[in-house]
Image (spheres, rainbow, N blue to C red):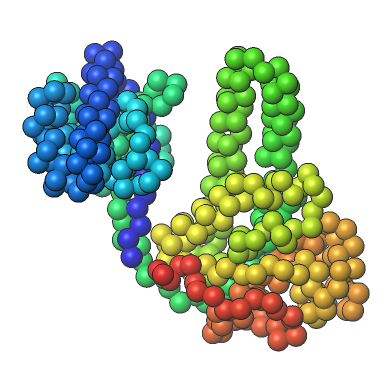
């Protein structure tokens, strides 16, 4: 099973290179717009047809190298196949690269790229993460990107073969919650307090900016949004990494909330509802899924209904079991636990029902627990 990963690397071009990058972007976009015109007039999105019709013109008119011309045509064909993009204009913000016009040199962490007039060695500002990922790799495709703030990035595409999902020896139950973003069945949780505090502060700033409605307020608003989303993504990465590491160490599958329909299930107060429906939860779930796939870890999408009101010890399900948002006290057996922890234990049990595991130490009274989930396909198994 192949997984594709994109690593964004910041470029540190010289002044001349910067100019050269700019003109390359413009030439590539112009070439795309020209090719799109030709394609529309031919009523075709076939690469071969378009190459015959437009290749020579593109090379002469825009001065692109052979392979950049081919990449422009390929991009146009792909874009025009999408009905929504059929009439869109190509902006000078990115250029596609393949192995013939792009290479990566590890010893000085540079990229060699064909630009409009020359082939350039471009220095980078890479972090440890990027270096770790690119070490020993020979990437064969990439995209040159100019961001809105004027910085240049190369998005390197790495294709990897993910290991076949291993037969798990256990299941880690994960509850995604409001106060604790994620809680595992051993009671460890990943607090969302820090992110939440920032989110609230940004929320207030956002309202002020929206009320002002001026141009600079809009700009500031955009900045706030970007910062908030970076922070949230960072938090989600940390959380998913820890979870995946744990699953790998213990050779376990991850039983995690099936996020489809999360909006219908949640009976949280309005303020929390917006948060649970937000992209951040979906992102966390997505991170967990793709990272698990990469490591050959099985993810079990579990129906989370009633996990917060069902007792993880005796299986008694009652709304009043959950005394408050944080506290769970079973009215049948008296089990007292933090509510998220109890829910995570239930997630584990439901995961085990979906994917029976041989040799689980603490089997528990799982057959007593009311379950509503039907067995579904495993996300990690490649379908
Ligand atoms: Zn109980």
The residue under the point 76% across, 74% down is 312
The residue under the point 37% across, 70% down is 164
Horizontal arrangement in the rendering, residue 313 relative to residue 275 (left or right): right
Would you place residue 280 above or below residue 371 in this image?
Answer: above
The image quadrant of residue 254 is bottom right
The residue under the point 40% across, 20% down is 150
Q: Where residue 221 sits in the image (x, y, percent)?
A: 62, 24
Q: How many marks?
A: 0
Q: Where residue 377 sits in the image (x, y, percent)?
A: 50, 74
Q: Closer to the camera, 252 or 151?
A: 151
Q: Quadrant of the C terminus?
A: bottom left
Would you place residue 29 above or below residue 177 in this image?
Answer: above
Q: Quadrant of the N terminus?
A: bottom left
The image quadrant of residue 91 is top left
Horizontal arrangement in the rendering, residue 123 relative to residue 69 (left or right): right
Query: Is residue 15 in view?
Result: yes
Horizontal arrangement in the rendering, residue 15 relative to residue 83 (left or right): left
Q: Closer to the camera, 84 or 99?
A: 84
Query: Is residue 187 in view?
Result: no
Give the quarter the ligand 1 occupies.
bottom right
The image quadrant of residue 171 is bottom right
Q: Where residue 56 sits in the image (x, y, percent)?
A: 8, 32
Q: Where residue 93 sits in the image (x, y, percent)?
A: 35, 28
Would you place residue 283 above or below residue 39 in this image?
Answer: below
The residue under the point 88% across, 58% down is 324
């Amino acid at each position: 099973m192949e997984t594709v990963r994109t690593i964004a690397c910041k470029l540190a071009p010289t002044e001349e290179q910067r100019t050269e990058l700019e003109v390359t972007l413009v030439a590539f976009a112009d070439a795309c717009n020209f090719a799109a015109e030709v394609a529309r007039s031919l009523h075709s999105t076939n690469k071969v047809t378009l190459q015959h019709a437009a290749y020579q013109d593109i090379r002469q008119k825009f001065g692109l190298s052979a392979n950049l011309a081919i990449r422009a045509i390929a991009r146009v064909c792909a874009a025009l196949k999408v009905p929504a993009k059929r009439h869109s204009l190509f902006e000078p913000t990115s250029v596609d690269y393949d192995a013939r016009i792009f290479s990566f040199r590890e010893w000085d962490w540079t990229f060699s790229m064909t630009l409009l007039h020359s082939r350039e060695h471009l220095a980078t500002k890479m972090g440890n993460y990027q270096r770790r990922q690119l070490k020993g790799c020979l990437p064969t495709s990439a995209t040159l990107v100019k961001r809105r703030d004027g910085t240049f990035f190369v998005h390197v595409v790495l294709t990897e073969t993910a290991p076949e999902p291993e037969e798990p020896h256990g299941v880690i139950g994960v509850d995604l919650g409001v106060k604790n973003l994620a809680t595992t069945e051993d009671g460890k949780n990943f607090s969302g307090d820090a992110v939440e505090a920032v989110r609230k502060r940004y929320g207030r700033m956002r309202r002020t900016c929206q009320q002002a409605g001026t141009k600079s307020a809009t700009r500031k608003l955009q900045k706030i949004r970007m910062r908030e989303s970076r922070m949230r993504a960072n938090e989600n990465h940390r959380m998913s990494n820890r979870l995946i590491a744990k699953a790998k160490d213990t050779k376990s599958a991850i039983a995690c909330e099936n996020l489809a329909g999360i909006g219908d299930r949640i009976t949280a107060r309005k303020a929390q509802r917006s948060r649970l429906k937000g992209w951040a939860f979906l992102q966390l779930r997505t991170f967990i899924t793709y990272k698990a796939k990469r490591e050959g870890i099985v993810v079990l999408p579990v129906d989370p209904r009633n996990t917060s009101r069902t007792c993880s010890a005796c299986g008694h399900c009652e709304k009043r079991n959950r005394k408050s948002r944080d506290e769970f006290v079973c009215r049948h057996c008296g089990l007292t636990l933090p509510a998220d922890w109890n829910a995570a234990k239930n997630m584990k049990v439901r995961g085990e029902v979906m994917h029976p595991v041989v040799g689980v130490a603490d089997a528990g009274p799982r057959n007593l627990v009311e379950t509503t989930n039907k067995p579904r396909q495993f996300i990690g198994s490649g379908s």
